């Protein structure tokens, strides 16, 4: 990557996925004098190791669920007595957004532990509340909020079935009120940035905080050290101004010197169209037609997530295949446009949830 950047005289490199960040791609670029948006390998452990993040929270009094770190399956099962049921079982390392089991029964918890086997796990208390995602830009110790969103992790409608990388999202998330967002910045994101800077591993990039909005206030579920999706597809169309300048300011430590990020004031909705079998083994090679028809719907962009060009045209190649995103003046209108666009797509091997945004819809209709 360094050779490629030097050869093409690249001024700014944005590292998107988590694996290259954990592997130290950003470190190598910085050492070569190339501006890079993305944390170093040490700071990327916020996503690379859930145990690392939980320990950082404990030391710095950052609100999060109580937890234990274990290496043996037997110890994980013993920890179930401490937390009771429901309980949360997390793989310690990278798991593409699917390494978490929220076990509602003892047998489900033990099955998750057995499936993981011996190795690093985090067992933690179940938090009551509603989830929301907060995205902040951080260039060391300076941290500013960018946008909020709400994801839908479960594969099935009504938030049922196994976790996925995300089946849809909308932005902004009204449930994360300005007051709650300010608390999350003051109590969670800010202290995290300061702790990493104090440790000599300052964070530079986007810090995506998955939050649980509990009766006591926002608590950290986990961090991603990247924009993530489908939230990224939902928030990107709302960002006003020069996005490249924002990224460059973060990469060069100038975040405090520029105007804060601004959003358009509109609403967006992203619906994931996945291949049959996801989040297990997805069907591959299914023909996809009428993308153009979907994008004829006002305010709609179709992002390709797992597609390829086959002999007969566009085909599925992955689990989450398309991210259909609509922007409108209200949440209800964005949702209506997004589903209108999804219904235009001809993908026999695909499926999607019909209830993305159901919580917000219920609030608006209350």
Image (cartoon, rainbow, N blue to C red):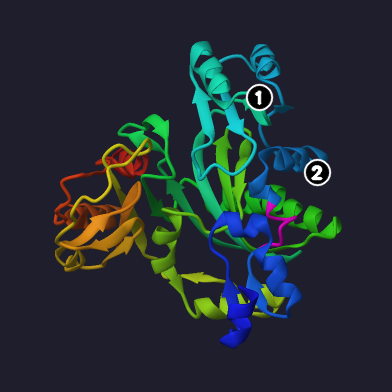
- Where is residue 198? Give x, y as percent: 85, 57
Answer above or below: position of 65 versus 323.
above
User: Which of the two residues, 55 or 363, is positioned nearer the viewer here?
Assistant: 55
Please report the residue visible at 41 percent of the width from the left and 53 percent of the height from the top: 230
Answer above or below: position of 215 versus 326.
above
Q: Is residue 288 left or right of residue 236?
A: left
- The N terminus sits in image quarter: bottom right
**Residue 43 is a magenta residue:** yes
Dot 1 lies on which element?
loop
> Which residue reaches farthest front?
311
Magenta segment's dominant SS is loop
* Residue range (magenta): 39-44
Residue 324: mark in rendering = none
Q: Is residue 22 left or right of residue 198?
A: left
Answer above or below: position of 300 versus 318.
below
- Where is residue 175? Give x, y as percent: 47, 45
Q: Is residue 117 left or right of residue 30?
A: left
**Residue 306 is a magenta residue:** no
Q: Which residue is mark 2?
A: 60
- Where is residue 142? Give x, y as percent: 72, 66
Please report the residue visible at 51 percent of the width from the left and 28 percent of the height from the top: 101
User: Which of the two residues, 129 or 105, is positioned nearer the viewer here?
Assistant: 105
Please report the residue visible at 36 percent of the width from the left and 60 percent of the height from the top: 267
Q: Which residue is mark 1?
A: 118
């Amino acid at each position: 990557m360094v050779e490629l950047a030097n050869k093409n005289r690249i001024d700014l490199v944005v590292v998107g996925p988590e694996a290259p960040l954990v592997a130290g791609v950003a470190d190598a670029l910085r050492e070569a004098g190339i501006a890079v948006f993305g944390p170093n390998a040490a700071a990327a452990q916020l996503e690379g190791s859930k145990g690392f993040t939980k320990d950082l929270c404990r030391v710095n009094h950052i609100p999060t669920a109580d937890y234990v770190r274990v290496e043996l399956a037997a110890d994980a099962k013993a920890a179930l007595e401490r937390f009771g049921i429901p309980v949360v079982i997390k793989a310690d390392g990278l798991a593409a957004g699917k390494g978490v089991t929220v076990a509602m029964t003892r047998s489900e918890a033990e099955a998750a532990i057995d499936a993981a086997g011996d190795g690093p796990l985090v067992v933690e208390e179940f938090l009551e509340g509603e989830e929301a995602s907060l995205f902040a830009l951080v260039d060391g110790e300076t941290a500013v909020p960018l946008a909020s969103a709400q994801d839908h992790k479960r594969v099935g409608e009504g938030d049922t079935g196994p976790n996925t990388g995300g089946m849809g999202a909308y932005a902004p998330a009204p449930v994360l009120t300005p007051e709650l967002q300010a608390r999350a910045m003051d109590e969670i994101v800010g202290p995290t940035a300061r702790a990493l800077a104090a440790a000599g591993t300052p964070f530079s990039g986007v810090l995506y905080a998955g939050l649980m909005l509990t009766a006591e206030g926002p608590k950290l579920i986990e961090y991603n050290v990247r924009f993530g999706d489908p939230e990224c597809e939902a928030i990107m169309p709302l960002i006003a101004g020069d996005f490249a300048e924002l990224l460059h300011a973060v990469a060069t430590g100038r975040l405090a010197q520029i105007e804060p990020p601004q959003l358009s004031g509109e609403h967006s909705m992203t619906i994931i169209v996945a291949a049959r079998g996801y989040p297990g083994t997805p069907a591959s090679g299914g023909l996809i037609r009428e993308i153009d028809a979907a994008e004829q719907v006002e305010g709609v962009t179709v992002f390709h997530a797992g597609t390829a060009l086959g002999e007969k045209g566009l085909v599925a190649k992955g689990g989450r295949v398309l991210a259909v995103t609509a922007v409108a003046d209200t949440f209800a209108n964005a949702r209506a446009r997004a589903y209108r666009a999804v219904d235009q797509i001809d993908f026999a091997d695909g499926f999607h949830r019909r209830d993305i945004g159901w919580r917000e819809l219920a609030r608006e209709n209350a």
